Image (cartoon, rainbow, N blue to C red):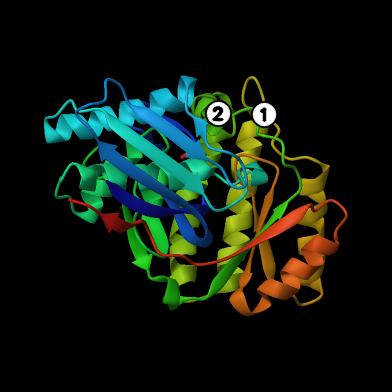
């Protein structure tokens, strides 16, 4: 049995829109930081006695559940990719657990597929460099999972199957930032990112988003290299708004933001006016990720928790990438 841990990640420049569903190729490069406190642990055991794959998911503070339907299909399809590479047909027992509330609306699929890929590949004894591992993780269908493989600050390149991989641009120690997640809604999102990745092209603003994306990607990378929070923050806010503008104008449209989302956005902007440097970004859900210098994370947490719309917060610093924790021969 092999066990791997992988982090969730938050994108400063978002992956939005899938150019090739078979290979999970994006329309644009993206850039993220790993979250040190939002982790998935996954164990994989290939067992010749099994007739089919068996997957058990344990979400934070919930009893274990046997996966069925679409979640099971996605795991089996990804195990099939790994089996094809290893030239075996052996079925697997997979157990996976999250250390963060599943209802926090954090993209847990990124952590889950990164951990599954690393554990599965090593259980099969496949030797793989990090680039190849991130490409294989990308093909799981959860493209952002490729960014949970390398450490720290990570860029996922646009390209073809060979060139679209994720790599670290700086380790966690390079710049001590924090992501304080403000949870304003614990309902599961009604429209998953998978469906909207296909609908993005129907928005008249999708082309506008892509026109500006290279400039934002370059600015965000430079901001990280120069530890420039003002440049990173203004760039990430512009990119998040651009992504959600595309959602709101696709057909049929999707609205991820709710009143709580807007309340946090306005609060963060007001705090900034008063000298607390913090910026927002939002994934495919209503909850808001507030990015600030790590030294400000507890004041940001305290202020967020004082807002009536915020149910709870999750405080993260920059995390390492996927790693093996236990290998039995
Ligand atoms: O990788 P997916 O299919 O779960 O899509 C991720 C989409 C966003 O989280 C909204 C953006 C991103 O780059 O992480």
Q: Earlier in the sequence, mark 1 or mark 2?
A: 2
Residue 4 got which mark?
A: none
Please name the residue shown 53% across and 37% down the image. Answer: 64
Q: Are marks 1 and 2 in contact (CB under 8 Å)?
A: yes
Please name the residue shown 47% across and 59% down the image. Answer: 34
The verdict on label 1 being within 8 Å of ligand 1 is no
Relative placement, left or right, of 268 versus 229 is right
Relative placement, left or right, of 90 versus 112 is left
Relative placement, left or right, of 73 versus 102 is left
Quickly name the residue at label 2.
Answer: 196
Crowdedness near tag 2: few (<14), some (14–19) or many (≥20) residues, C-alpha within 10 Å = many
What is the spatial separation of the Cα atoms under label 1 and label 2, in whole angstroms?
A: 8 Å
Q: Nearer the viewer, residue 298 or 29?
A: 298
Is the residue 164 above or below the residue 271 in the image?
above
Location of residue 26 in the rendering, given as x and y in whole percent from the top left corner: 40, 37
Please identify the quarter of the rendering in which residue 112 is found: top left
Regarding residue 59, the answer to whether it shows in the image is yes
Crowdedness near tag 1: few (<14), some (14–19) or many (≥20) residues, C-alpha within 10 Å = some
Q: Tag 2's secondary structure?
A: helix
Quickly name the residue at label 1.
Answer: 254
């Amino acid at each position: 049995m092999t066990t791997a841990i992988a982090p969730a990640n938050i994108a400063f420049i978002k992956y939005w829109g899938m150019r090739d569903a078979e290979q999970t190729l994006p329309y644009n490069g993206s850039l993220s930081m790993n979250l040190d406190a939002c982790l998935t642990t996954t164990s994989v055991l290939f067992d010749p006695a099994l007739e089919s794959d068996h997957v058990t998911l344990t979400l934070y503070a919930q009893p274990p559940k046997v996966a069925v339907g679409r979640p099971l299909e996605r795991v089996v399809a990804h195990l099939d990719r790994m089996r094809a590479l290893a030239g075996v047909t052996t079925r697997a027992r997979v157990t996976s657990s999250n250390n963060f509330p599943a209802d926090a609306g954090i993209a847990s699929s990124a952590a889950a597929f990164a951990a599954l890929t690393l554990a599965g590949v090593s259980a099969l004894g496949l030797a793989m460099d990090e680039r190849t591992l991130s490409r294989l993780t990308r093909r799981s269908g959860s493209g952002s999972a490729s960014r949970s493989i390398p450490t720290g600050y990570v860029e996922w390149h646009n390209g073809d199957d060979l060139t679209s991989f994720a790599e670290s641009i700086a380790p966690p120690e390079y710049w001590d930032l924090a992501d304080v997640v403000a949870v304003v809604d614990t309902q599961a999102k009604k429209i998953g990112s998978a469906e909207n990745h296909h609908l993005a092209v129907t928005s008249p603003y999708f082309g506008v988003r892509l026109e500006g994306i290279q400039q934002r990607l370059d600015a965000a990378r430079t901001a990280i290299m120069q530890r420039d929070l003002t440049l990173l923050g203004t760039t990430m806010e512009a990119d998040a708004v651009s992504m959600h503008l595309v959602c709101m104008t696709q057909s049929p449209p999707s609205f991820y933001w709710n009143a709580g989302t807007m309340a946090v956005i306005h609060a963060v902007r007001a705090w900034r006016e008063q000298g607390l440097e913090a910026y927002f970004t939002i994934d495919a859900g209503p909850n808001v990720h507030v990015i600030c210098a790590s030294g400000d994370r507890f004041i940001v947490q305290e202020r967020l928790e004082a807002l009536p719309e915020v149910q709870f917060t999750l405080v993260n610093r920059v995390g390492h990438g996927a790693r093996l924790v236990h290998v039995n021969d």
